Amino acid sequence: MKKFITAAFVVVVFSGIGYWQLFSAPQGKNATPEYIQIRTNERVGDIADELKAKNIIRSSAVFLIDAKIIGLDTKILPGRYQVDGSVNVQGIINALMHPKNFEVSVTVPEGFTVQDIDARLTKMGLISSGDFSLVARPLEGFLFPDTY
């Protein structure tokens, strides 16, 4: 009986290690960066679901456990994050905890109104609809056509 329990324990341990290795490995060789938007007070579970839906991670459960161990649930800030699908779960968590700045070029043609600029920024996925209109309304007429 003792040998059976020992053998079962060894099988469970090695199965757990194998599962962890399989599901914490990179999803694929896709080096194309993906962007995810994290909102204020968004739960780590929601972030894991979004990463899983975009095929960036293999298992949201492994992501949640790693995030809890590393402390991502207390260190993440709202914003737009660039994550690489060719890194493992720990690399993705690191990218969320220590984001790199990335540049986005936006051209505002002559004659664009605040609503037009808002629509363009929304279409690019940089803001939610109406966000720019709320803050730029007093600046209408002062925003010059240019590439920002």
Image (cartoon, rainbow, N blue to C red):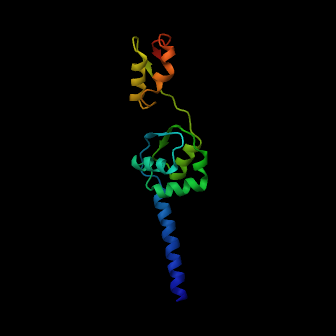
- Camera sees residue 105: no
32 or 121, which is in the foreground?
Answer: 121
- Taking the spot 49% from the left edge, 48% from the top edge, the residue there is 87
Q: Residue at x 44, y 31 (%)?
A: 128
State left or right for residue 109 relative to residue 136: left
The image position of residue 88, as x and y in percent, is 50, 52
Looking at the image, residue 113 sits to the left or right of residue 68; the answer is left
Judge by depth and name the residue closer to the eye, 48 or 22: 48
Residue 3 x, y percent position in the rendering? 53, 86
As drawn, 132 above or below 28: above
Residue, far bottom? 1
* Residue at figure coordinates x 39%, y 48% from the top left: 53
How far from the left and from the top, in percent, is residue 112? 40, 14
One can see residue 140 in this view = yes
**Near-viewer residue (43 or 67):** 43
- Residue 129's place in the image compared with 137, above or below, is below
Picture layout, residue 28 above or below residue 122: below
Give the residue at x 45% y 12%: 145
